[in-house]
Image: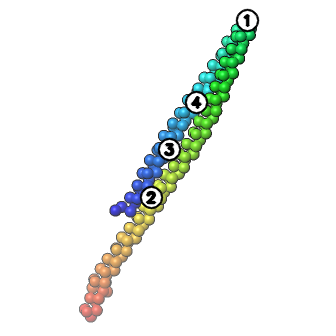
Amino acid sequence: MNPLQPLMALLAQTERERDAAWADAQRMAQAHQAAQAQAEQLLTYRREYEQRWGAQFKSEGRIELVHCYRGFVDRLSQAVDQQQRITAHAQTQVERARDTLREHEVRVASVRKLIERRSAELRLSADRAEQKQTDEFGARSAWNHPVLGGPNLARAA
């Protein structure tokens, strides 16, 4: 079994979690943009309504009409306030999702760094083992070679 296999599995898992957090952050950002756009539409509509009816009241200002106008503007203002609260909540959700995404990105980077270190350790260990094997082979060759002063030299004398 590859000694890095558990770390590779961990990396795959952290990348999946990061990707899910990214998708969640994207959904939250879209929801915030939609809430913000709706709030802006309500504000624009209220402004236009007030301008249109303000001009109407200058020419004729029947009290029943003024009461209806005031009641509608009040409800419209409540809708604007509620939509602004929704927008603020969506902004908070976006910030939380981005924080979560950053945490997942840090985890992925940490696991990658750990894999790099373990790979370097494994390469160093393999290099040392290879060097030791080469040194042992060289020592055996010198020991068994008569010209180099191994045990066969003593028999020749």
Amino acid tagged 4 = Ala
Badge 1 marks a residue whose secondary structure is loop
Q: Residues within 10 Å of mark 2 (few under 14, many from 20)?
A: some
Q: Mark 2 vs mark 1: give the one in front.
A: 1
| Alpha carbon distance from label 2 to label 1 | 79 Å
Are circles 4 and 1 on residues that touch, CB within 8 Å? no
Q: Position of residue 140 (x, y in %)?
A: 31, 80
Amino acid tagged 3 = Ala
The residue positioned farthest toward the left in the image shown: 156
Q: Is residue 51 visible?
A: no
| Alpha carbon distance from label 4 to label 1 | 37 Å
Left or right: residue 102 versus residue 61 is: left
User: Residue at image x 44%, y 65%?
Assistant: 121
Q: Which mark is residue 35?
A: 4
Quickly name the residue at label 3: 21
On the image, which quarter does residue 115 sit in?
Answer: bottom left
The residue positioned farthest toward the bottom in the image shown: 157
Q: Mark 3 vs mark 4: give the one in front.
A: 4
Q: Earlier in the sequence, mark 2 or mark 1?
A: 1
